[in-house]
Image: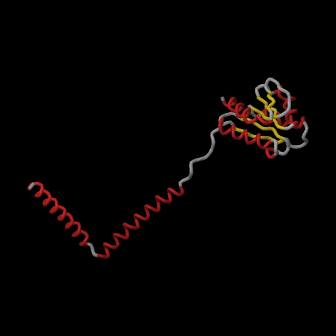
């Protein structure tokens, strides 16, 4: 017990000696100098904190760009584009299928006269511009698919609610197009 007591007393003396030395060092500075040192230290700490906070706040967000595979599905619509009552849910289904398959989707509205011949010119531009799947909605557009599908055997065509089946043409009922489009886009990217 006496050894422990002696060791504790020695540690207390050493601690007191260290405190005395630190106090003597601090006391050697004049109060104005001590105050200036404290202000400089506080200013440096504030500067470092501000720089770190500013960097964190102004750091750019990571890019939110989607990576697409080299596959595109296209929608051919009437002059109302994707805002029509029949077209809007179809376009939404294509966008949702694009999220899961990573295939690009785009649409083209038939401009000018709403005739099968004019729609076929627009359809030819879609089929010739690397659209692997072309979805047509509206009587005029599905008639254009029936006329042009044989010219593009490598392209899959989906005619919504009307048209004639062929080797690369499927006629899809309006109520079941979401599943069909999802399947076609998945097949397109695989």
**Residue 124 x/y as whole percent:** 82, 33
Establish if 50 lies above or below 185: below
Establish if 152 lies above or below 98: above
**Residue 34 x/y as whole percent:** 31, 72
Any part of residue 130 in sight:
no
In this view of the protein, which residue sits in the foreground, 173 or 13?
A: 173
Q: Residue furthest top?
A: 167
Query: What residue do we see at 79% from left, 28% from top?
Result: 170
Q: Determine whether, in the image, residue 61 is placed left or right of residue 22.
A: right
Query: What residue do we see at 78% from left, 36% from top?
Result: 175
Q: Determine whether, in the image, residue 25 is placed left or right of residue 102.
A: left
Q: Quadrant of the N terminus?
A: bottom left
**Residue 185 x/y as whole percent:** 70, 33
Any part of residue 174 in sight:
yes
**Residue 39 x/y as whole percent:** 37, 70
In this view of the protein, which residue sits in the foreground, 59 or 188?
A: 188
Establish if 113 lies above or below 26: above
How many discs appear?
0
Establish if 173 lies above or below 56: above
- Identify the image quadrant of residue 26: bottom left
Query: What residue do we see at 54% from left, 57% from top?
Result: 58
């Amino acid at each position: 017990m006496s050894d422990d007591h002696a060791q504790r007393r020695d540690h207390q003396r050493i601690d007191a000696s260290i405190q005395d030395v630190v106090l003597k060092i601090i006391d050697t500075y004049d109060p104005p100098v001590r105050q200036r040192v404290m202000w400089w230290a506080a200013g440096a700490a504030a500067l470092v904190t501000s720089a770190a906070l500013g960097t964190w706040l102004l750091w750019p967000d990571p890019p939110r760009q989607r990576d697409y595979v080299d596959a595109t599905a296209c929608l051919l619509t009437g002059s109302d584009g994707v805002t029509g009552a029949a077209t809007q849910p179809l376009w939404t289904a294509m966008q949702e299928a694009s999220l899961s398959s990573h295939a690009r989707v785009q649409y083209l509205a038939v401009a000018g006269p709403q005739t099968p011949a004019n729609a076929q010119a627009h359809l030819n531009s879609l089929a010739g511009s690397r659209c692997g799947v072309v979805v047509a909605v509206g009587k005029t557009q599905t008639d254009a698919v029936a006329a042009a599908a044989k010219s593009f055997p490598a392209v899959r065509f989906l005619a919504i609610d009307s048209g004639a089946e062929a080797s690369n043409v499927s006629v899809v009922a309006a109520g079941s197009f979401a599943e069909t489009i999802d399947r076609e886009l998945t097949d397109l990217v695989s």
